[in-house]
Image (cartoon, grey):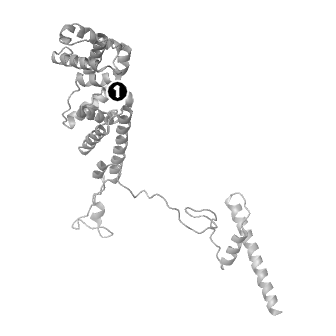
Amino acid sequence: MYNADCSESSTSKITRLQELCLHLLRWTSLASGKPRKKPSTSLAINYGRRVRAGSLPRVRKQGRRDGFQRGRRRVPQLRHDPRVGDVADARLNSLSLSTYLVDPKKGGGGADGEAGRKHKRPNISSDSAKVKRMQRNMARIQEVADYLSLPKKIVEIALDVYAEAEKQGVNMRGPERESMAVAVLFIACRKAGNARSLKEFEEASGIPKRRIGKSFMSLQRRLDLEVKQATTEEYVQRFCSRLGLPSKTQMIAHTVAKKADSLELSSGQPPVAVAASVIYLVAAYTNAKRSIQEISDVTMIGEKSMKRVCKELNKSRVVLFEGVVMT
């Protein structure tokens, strides 16, 4: 009988303690201003078991946590670790942080070394900003190269030129900063013998060709680069291929372009404009039937400019087509 009374009294105490905990939970929810929610009975039981004299239990959130799920075995989810993996480009390795040691004669670290705190530390923020700038410009180089369908060899040359410019501290300011990535790609095309006009880079990047040309001249001067100018023959070869001209027409156009350069008939004119004019003249002589509008669309040379150069070349047509078989 005594044991039964004891068990009933202990049960009633636990029940009252649970009710007290429920009231406390309601009071805390109202005081915090959050919407009132019905507390869990199991949560109240846990609180009732943890109540101590003069202290309240710490409220813990129940539910899903990062990497765990409620009601299941706690197994952390596998995630990708950003610290693992190779560097995006080997050219960024030179910008990795170095180890700096404090001279013990000037003061060590810690509370005793007052001079150590005055020691100059590496500017980590500037290095990270430089890495981000290089990554952004390298991505820009690849973007323009993909638009122009340039081979991987030219992209690698452009990245090397850009890395050398960053290494020597060539800083472009203002508008030239945007055109630097396009200018190094233009230099790479010149080095690889792939004739590309500034107008093509303007269309691919949206940057005016004058700004690209200004950045090109600045890089060529600061890096002391020997970049040869694209010849009329190189432009003729590429434009004829894009126009789908017959092989006979391409051979004649190549010969006429070579004569025009040797006789300096196109002095003062850009090679791309001379190439477009030569193609128009040769196509007309060989009945290849290519309109001036078609050639203008492919070469990106205005019709007025092409007609003006054609007028100059047509004065020496006898010399240009001498020994050329038209059949």
Q: Nearer the viewer, residue 260 or 309?
A: 260
Residue 163 x/y as whole percent = 27, 44
Residue 78 x/y as whole percent = 50, 61
Q: Nearer the viewer, residue 216 or 101?
A: 216
* Residue at (80, 84) in percent of width and height: 8
- Would you call the spot at circle 1 few (<14 residues within 10 Å), some (14-19), or many (20 or more)? some
Can you tell which quarter of the image residue 54 is in? bottom right
Q: Is residue 3 visible?
A: yes
Q: Is residue 81 left or right of residue 242?
A: right
Q: Is residue 243 left or right of residue 193?
A: right
Residue 186 x/y as whole percent = 29, 32
Q: What quarter of the picture does the N terminus occupy?
A: bottom right
Q: Relative to residue 312, is residue 182 depicted above or below? A: below
Residue occupied by mark 1: 200
Q: How many marks?
A: 1
Q: Nearer the viewer, residue 113 or 267?
A: 267
Q: Is residue 170 visible?
A: no
Can you tell which quarter of the image residue 19 is in? bottom right
What kind of residue is marked 1?
Glu
